Image: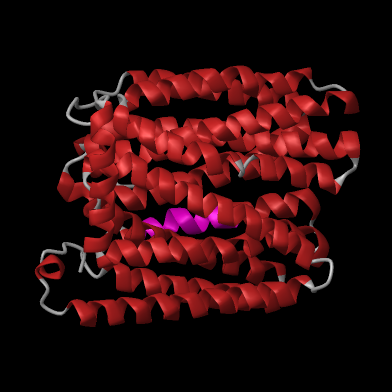
């Protein structure tokens, strides 16, 4: 952990801790809720519907969250979304029978809608809270945060729910939202961005976004990646539990073990990502390719320990790659437009991820898990090569164009 960076950026430190608390609580609740749903219904369809309801709200609320982040004070948006979600996080306590399943569906949708507003607002807040020269350092920390959430939430949440019952997880989730809101209330946000804009500026706002996109080759490449990578990501998201339960016969503890491996990989990625200084896109492409290689090897692994290591390796490469791409985004997009752009990206990626998970689940009815995993890994490799080729072609076409010469990412 980079304690010197935390010391230098006290406002981001509070946002980081709030993200950990918020994320761990949500993972606790998710594990307990899905377990309870299976116990009450015994239906895989019910689980599929619930997972879809956690993704679909991004289609509507993702762009809305981005727009709100660019029009209103971001601190206020973060606090309000956390406080409102407390009620729905605790509503799972009211589920006692199959007739109460509608509460799970409604609350899952609202909680996901809140996250769709919260996520782009939080991401757009980061450049406001830190010094520009620390952008390279902050994105590795974001991957560490996700890793901590996976280890402390998904893995530990399953153990807690098993030992003490699901209700303790639901209460913990509600409390986590309140604690996160309290932490964010103590953050000092600058007032230069995130304030309400007059209506007559809306056209100018979107015209400027179009100009930013057309002028930035790295941004174009990343948006292309956001349209392709989630379509493959759904495969390995679905296969985590399938590998644990059906292939290695480890049950629920195996699911937690493999999620824990992902968390470990993301935390370890900080060691490399924190040292990167340049060539972020090319490094990101390389990590995407190596992530695909890890998934290919995982699909053919016959030993639990090797599978655990390949899950770690996959997340390790993903953490470095995500750091590279997020750093490029934060450098290329002006602060006042970041909320809208991050909202658009979240909408695209989460919508396509939901479609991918649905298709992957259906494909498993006809394709063996290992074969599907092999296809997913090879697809990652192909996408990385495609993105690299498009980038090199675009770069050669730009040549000495003044816009390209001003690019800060390569």
Q: Residue at 83% x, 72% y: name it.
A: 366
Q: Which residues are magenta?
A: 261-271
**Where is residue 326 shown, x and y percent of the image?**
34, 54
**How far across and down, in percent of the image, does residue 317 sit?**
45, 66
Instruction: Give above or below for 134 relative to 368.
Output: above
Magenta-drawn stretch, dominant element (helix, strand or loop): helix
Residue 64 at x, y percent in the picture: 44, 35
Using residue 171 as the reference point, say whether residue 215 is left or right of it: left
* Residue 20 can be seen, yes or no: no
Observer-nearest residue: 158 or 77?
A: 77
**Residue nearest the observer in this picture, 263 or 70:** 70
14 relative to 185, above or below: below
Q: Is residue 234 left or right of residue 267?
A: right
The residue at 40%/58% (across/down) is: 322
Toward the viewer: 352 or 85? 352
Task: Examine the image and state in which quarter residue 307 appears.
Answer: bottom right
Is 113 part of what is drawn in magenta? no
Q: Looking at the image, which is closer to me, 251 or 170? A: 170
Looking at the image, how many numbered discs can be counted on the residues? 0
Q: Would you place residue 169 above or below residue 2 in this image?
A: above
Residue 270 lies within the magenta run: yes
> If the image is split into quadrants, where does the C terminus sit?
bottom left
Residue 53, horizontal then vertical, whole percent? 67, 40
């Amino acid at each position: 952990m980079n304690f010197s960076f935390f010391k230098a950026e006290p406002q981001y430190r509070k946002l980081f801790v709030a993200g950990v608390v918020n994320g761990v609580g949500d993972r606790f609740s998710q594990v307990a809720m899905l377990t309870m749903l299976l116990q009450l219904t015994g239906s895989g369809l019910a689980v599929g519907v619930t997972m879809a309801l956690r993704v679909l709200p991004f289609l509507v609320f993702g762009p809305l969250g981005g727009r709100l982040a660019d029009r209103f004070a971001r601190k206020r948006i973060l606090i309000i979304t956390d406080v409102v979600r407390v009620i729905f996080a605790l509503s799972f306590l009211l589920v006692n029978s199959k007739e109460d399943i509608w509460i799970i569906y409604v609350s899952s949708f609202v909680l996901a809608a809140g996250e769709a507003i919260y996520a782009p607002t939080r991401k757009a807040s980061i450049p406001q809270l830190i010094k520009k020269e620390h952008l390279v350092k902050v994105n590795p920390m974001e991957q560490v945060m996700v890793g901590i959430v996976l280890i402390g939430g998904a893995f530990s949440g399953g153990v807690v729910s098993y030992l003490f019952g699901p209700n303790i997880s639901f209460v913990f989730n509600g409390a986590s939202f309140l604690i996160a809101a309290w932490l964010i209330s103590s953050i000092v946000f600058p007032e230069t961005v995130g304030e309400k804009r007059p209506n007559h500026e809306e056209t100018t706002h979107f015209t400027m976004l179009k100009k930013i996109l057309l002028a930035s080759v790295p941004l174009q490449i990343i948006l292309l990646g956001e349209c392709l990578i989630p379509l493959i990501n759904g495969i390995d998201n679905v296969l985590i539990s399938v590998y644990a339960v059906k292939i290695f016969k480890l049950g629920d503890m195996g699911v937690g073990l493999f999620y824990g491996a992902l968390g470990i990989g993301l935390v370890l990625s900080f060691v490399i990502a924190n040292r990167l200084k340049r060539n972020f896109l090319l490094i990101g492409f390389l990590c995407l390719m190596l992530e695909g290689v890890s998934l290919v090897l995982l699909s053919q692994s016959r030993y639990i320990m090797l599978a655990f290591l390949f899950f770690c390796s996959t997340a390790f490469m993903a953490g470095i790659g995500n750091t590279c791409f997020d750093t490029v985004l934060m450098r290329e997009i002006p602060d006042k437009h970041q909320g809208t752009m991050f909202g658009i990206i979240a909408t695209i990626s989460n919508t396509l991820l939901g479609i991918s998970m649905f298709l992957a689940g259906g494909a498993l009815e006809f394709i063996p898990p290992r074969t599907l995993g092999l296809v997913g890994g090879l697809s990652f490799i192909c996408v990385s090569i495609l993105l690299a080729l498009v980038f090199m072609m675009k770069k050669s076409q730009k040549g000495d164009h003044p816009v390209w010469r001003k690019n800060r990412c390569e």
